[in-house]
């Protein structure tokens, strides 16, 4: 099998290596000349046997739109594009309709595994026509971990379903990380606790909160026990926002995921205007003391 792969960043580069390790021939394209195999999309199309399969692994939004449009000009009827980035499911449906005008097939695949995927494999959630997914199955099998397919791969449904499942996956991830983080702060705040890293390490086997995220947390604390090298600023990729928007659109209560997203917003404020008002109101109705602007935060 010979496929194309566009986007050789942190994940795409490792995915190309994992596919090649599974004896799948990969021709990669990236704007970085140090990692690309070909110079242009035209060269990529020319290098692949028909019907072509091209996996797209670039940032969601405008960049993916540009790549899909560029490929539409180079590919032929019967070729297939798989979007493995973090695109919104509504973009998948738009891209599928755009490509269908030329007879080009489209599938989407949510991918989880991050920088550890090369070694451990990736969790995969695919959306698209059943025949297209079956044709691409050797790719999915090469990327996922060894073992039962159902434990690391699912054909979720029609186009867009894979990325919708990945969106929910990431929303859950937000909530899990926030819970671990709040537990960490609570343990750090109590003077009778003498070994915070050791406490989390002791939860890795036998407890109901054990997980790969917990293992990574232990690794982070081993490298920097008090997280002194890291600022308390947390960005978001967009998937948490989309999850909350979908919860609202479908009237599904999602308080934990929503609160975890808002906690990230709070992390970006050195001096929150909202919390200034809370402090002012407490002073007004109860005479509670306020801190002067610019004073150090409580430890």
Image (tube, rainbow, N blue to C red):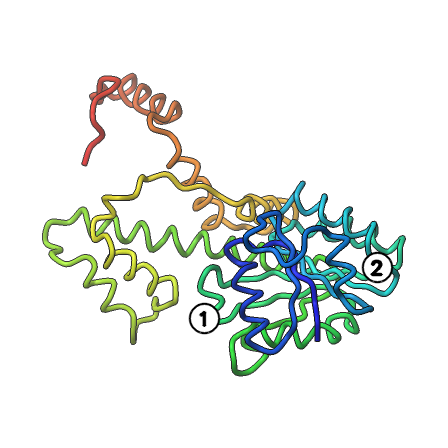
Residue 10: image x %, image y %?
50, 55
Query: In the figure, 194 relative to 264: above or below?
Result: below
Disc number at residue 242?
none
Q: Residue at x 48, y 50 (%)?
A: 257
Given contact means CB atoms under 8 Å apart, are the residues at marks 2 and 1 in contact? no
Q: Residue furthest bottom?
A: 147
Residue 214: image x %, image y %?
34, 63
Q: Quick one: SS at disc 2?
A: loop
Q: Quick one: SS at disc 1?
A: helix
Which of marks 1 and 2 precedes in the sequence? 2
Q: Residue at x 18, y 46 (%)?
A: 189
Query: In the figure, 279 relative to 190: above or below?
Result: above
Judging depth in this view, the residue of 171 and 218 nearest the camera is: 218
Q: Residue at x 19, y 57 (%)?
A: 196
Quarter in which the C terminus is drawn:
top left
Q: Along the horizontal axis of the image, is 249 left or right of 120?
A: right
Q: Which residue is mark 2?
A: 104
Distance between the alpha carbons at the discs numbered 2 and 1: 33 Å
All told, the count of numbered labels is 2
- Disc 2 packing (10 Å; few <14; some 14–19; many ≥20): many
Q: Which residue is mark 1?
A: 119
Q: Along the horizontal axis of the image, is 11 left or right of 200?
A: right
Quarter in which the N terminus is drawn:
bottom right
Q: Along the horizontal axis of the image, is 160 left or right of 17?
A: right
Judging depth in this view, the residue of 122 and 266 nearest the camera is: 122
The image quarter containing residue 278 is: top left
Query: In the figure, 248 relative to 265: above or below?
Result: below
Q: Along the horizontal axis of the image, is 189 left or right of 251?
A: left
Residue 231: image x %, image y %?
31, 39
Residue 229: image x %, image y %?
26, 44
- Disc 1 packing (10 Å; few <14; some 14–19; many ≥20): few
The image quarter containing residue 245 is: top right
């Amino acid at each position: 099998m010979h496929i194309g792969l566009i986007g050789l960043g942190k994940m795409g580069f490792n995915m190309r290596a994992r596919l090649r390790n599974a004896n799948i021939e990969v021709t990669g394209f990236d704007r970085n000349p140090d990692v690309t195999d070909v110079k242009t999309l035209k060269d990529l199309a020319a290098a692949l046997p028909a019907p072509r399969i091209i996996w797209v692994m670039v940032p969601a939004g405008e960049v993916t739109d540009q790549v899909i449009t560029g490929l539409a000009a180079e590919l032929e009827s019967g070729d297939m594009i798989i979007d493995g980035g973090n695109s919104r499911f509504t973009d998948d449906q738009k891209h599928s309709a755009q490509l269908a005008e030329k007879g080009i097939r489209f599938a989407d695949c949510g991918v989880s595994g991050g920088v550890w995927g090369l070694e451990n494999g990736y969790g995969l959630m695919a959306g698209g026509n059943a025949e297209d997914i079956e044709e691409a199955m050797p790719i999915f099998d090469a990327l996922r971990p060894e073992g039962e397919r159902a434990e690391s791969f699912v054909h979720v449904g029609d186009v867009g379903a894979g990325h919708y499942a990945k969106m929910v996956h990431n929303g859950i991830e937000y909530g899990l990380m926030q819970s671990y983080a709040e537990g960490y702060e609570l343990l750090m705040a109590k003077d009778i606790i003498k070994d915070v890293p050791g406490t989390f390490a002791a939860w890795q086997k036998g407890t109901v909160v054990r997980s790969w995220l917990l293992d990574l947390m232990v690794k982070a604390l081993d490298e920097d026990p008090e997280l002194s090298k890291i600022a308390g600023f947390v960005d978001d990729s967009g998937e948490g926002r989309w999850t909350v928007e979908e919860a609202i659109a479908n009237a599904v209560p999602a308080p934990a995921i929503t609160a975890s997203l808002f906690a990230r917003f709070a992390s970006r404020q050195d001096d929150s205007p909202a919390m200034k008002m809370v402090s002012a109101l407490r002073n007004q109705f109860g005479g509670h003391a306020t801190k002067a602007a610019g004073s150090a935060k409580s430890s």
